[in-house]
Amino acid sequence: MTTEDTPVVVARGAGPATPRRAAAAAFLGSVVEYYDLVAYGTAAALVFNTLFFRDVSPSVALVLSFATFASGYVVRPLGGLLFGWIGDRHGRRTAVMLTIVVMGAATVLIGLLPTYAAIGWVAPVLLVVLRVLQGLAVGGELGGAVLIAVEHAPERRRGFYGSFSTAGAQAGTVLATVVFAILTATLSEEAFAAWGWRVPFLASAVIVLVGVLIRYGLDETPDFERARTQERTRTPIRTAVTAHPGAILGIVAVMAGMMSIWYLLTVYSLSYATTEVGIARPTILWVVTAATFLVVVMNPVWGALSDRIGRTTLLSAGLVVEGVLLVVYFVALRSGSVAFIFVSLLAVAGIGHACVNGIFPAFVAEALPPEVRYTAGSLGMQLAALIAGFAPLVAVALEGSTFGVWTTCGLALLLCLAGATAAHLLVRAHTPETAVAPAAA
């Protein structure tokens, strides 16, 4: 690849507002994608076990329900490679438009899906198929949203602007959880199981339309426009794997712990709190909602701080803190005190998770060259998501072990320690052979 004498190409329509427009598009598009994702995860924890898995014990039905949740994570690396290739070859904007349409269609169809009582074993099969389509779309979404925000940002504010891409994911989580909390609080259990659970999935159609309109007017990123003028690789997948294996493995290690803990908090702990501790379903949903909203607020704070003091050490500290505070949260759950649960979850979300979540978009983007950034970054993120996607399933399986939930907490902490170490040893900031002018602020 040639980088000498590369002219600076400014994205169409670039101007003083471009970073803000790009951050808004990344934020709102991620809201759509992760609303759909979390709606599925919440339904899997609350009702899918009884609606789609009959003729088995309740514990087996719950494991099967979480297994369908995990199935979407199996294909997320494939989605990362597919949409990463599209994003590196044909543009970030094209890729993220496709991810949002595929995700929205799959989610609406889940809302229309007949249950086991209506069509038997065909129901869970179709559920898995639609979940796989969700997984493919989300596999390409995170990497694309990150690059839209970071690559449009001024060089010295990439942490701040990049943080909005992941804040959107948390905002989608808030929205989905609020919808479920309202429905479970206002409907009887019979009504919720009969039709109420479908409302969040069908409502996704409106949210998807908004997301498509927002992203349709987005310009291509300056980094991709510059890459157009270079002798680009025609095989970004092979180049990513062969030229940047250390960065990819480092990204996997950094993100696996953070993602695993988040799914333990927002998916597994819903089931654990209601079935093992006896906390009312609406109560724990509102607690999770408040903690997730705090992540949305704190993401830009941590991202901006990383612009000032550096990313690697701050991100590593956030991982360790998140792993330790997860243990505190489960101590609080075991106590049954709603106040203790609330405060501990706010701590793990706002101090630990938001720190890592707000920093990693710029951290990942700066570790890779633009021509393979979407592919390599998405592959690393989604391999981490593959590990994390099984966290609720592993947690359920370990409930009957000698140490029960503490085994799950210990494994999550080990993942965080591995990520903190990898951030220092495996991931290095990419330095272009020829410096180019930063994008317009």
Image (tube, rainbow, N blue to C red):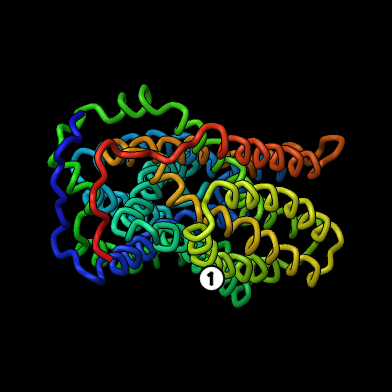
Q: Quadrant of the N terminus?
A: top left
Q: Report the front residue among 229 and 92.
A: 229
Can residue 305 be seen here?
yes
**Residue under the image location 46 percent in, 67 percent down:** 199
Q: How many marks?
A: 1
Q: Which residue is mark 1?
A: 297
Q: What residue is at 54 percent from the left and 62 percent from the top? A: 302
Amino acid type at image mark 1: Val
Q: State the residue in front, 361 or 391.
A: 361
| Residue 243 screen position, x and y as percent | 36, 25
Question: Between 249 and 86, which is closer to the camera in this rendering?
Answer: 249
421 vs 147: above or below:
above
Q: Residue at x 48, y 35 (%)?
A: 383
Horizontal placement of 168 versus 223: left or right? Answer: right
> Quarter-wise, where is residue 255 in the image?
top right
Dot 1, how many residues are within 10 Å of its Cα: few (below 14), some (14-19), or many (20+)?
A: some
Left-right relation of 223 to 130 = left
Q: Position of residue 430 (x, y in %)?
A: 38, 39
